Image: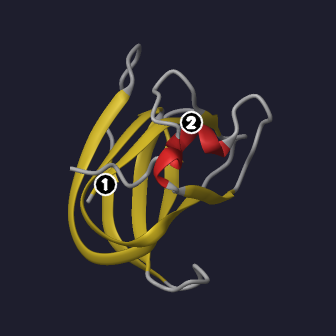
Amino acid sequence: MLDAALSSYGAQVVLATSSDENYPPQNIIDGKTETFWISTGLFPQEFVIRFPDNMKIFTISIYSYNIKRLRVEKGTSEDADNFETIAETEFEHTESSLQTNDISVNVPNATHLRFLILSGYDHFVSVHKVSVQS
């Protein structure tokens, strides 16, 4: 299966609500769990991934720290201005290891995915990797 959320495949992070030059949003799609994007506090936080083509999506995997509630939305327009909720979930708190969560979806077409971090277990959260199986 293809991981459509890799920068090497052509995916881009086109929006993030916070940014630190040491932990940029592009780290989410570099395919590594050692690098990450970190929020700057307050909720909600969000980021949007754009795909190079219209994608059919089966599974979204998220590797993170301190995320409590997450909503995932899909967009099908070129402008990323219309989104529809495809999943909302609560993550289990982990102390010393990455949260690893797989979200099964059946999305026939998406040009963008928007991730809304609605709450966290701490003031700051980090997203290490997002993988999208298509």
SS for tag 2? loop
SS for tag 1? strand
Q: Residue sitting at 46 percent across and 52 percent down?
A: 9
Label 1 – label 2 distance at C-alpha? 16 Å
Q: Residue sitting at 66 percent across and 41 percent down?
A: 39
Q: Position of residue 54 (x, y in %)?
A: 39, 75
Q: Residue furthest right?
A: 21
In the image, 80 versus 88, the foreground residue is 80
How many numbered marks, from 0 up? 2
Q: Residue sitting at 77 percent across and 37 percent down?
A: 20
Q: Position of residue 21 (x, y in %)?
A: 80, 35
| Residue 98: assigned label | none
Q: Please tell me how crowded label 1 is: few (under 14), some (14-19), or many (20+) other residues with Cα within 10 Å.
A: few
Q: In this view, does 88 lie to the left or right of 81?
A: left
Decide if residue 26 is in sight here.
yes
Q: Where is residue 52 in the image (x, y as percent from the top left)?
A: 49, 67
Decide if residue 123 is in sight here.
no
In the image, 98 versus 130, the foreground residue is 130
Q: Residue furthest top?
A: 96
Q: Name the residue under label 2.
A: 125
Q: Which amino acid does label 1 sit on?
A: Thr
Q: Which amino acid does label 2 sit on?
A: Val
Q: Which of marks 1 and 2 is nearer the N terminus?
A: 1
Q: Please tell me how crowded label 2 is: few (under 14), some (14-19), or many (20+) other residues with Cα within 10 Å.
A: many
Q: Mark 1 points at which residue?
A: 89
Q: Residue sitting at 33 percent across and 61 percent down?
A: 88
Instruction: From this view, report whether residue 32 is shown above or below residue 60.
Output: above
Which of the 4 quarters of the picture holds residue 58? Answer: bottom left
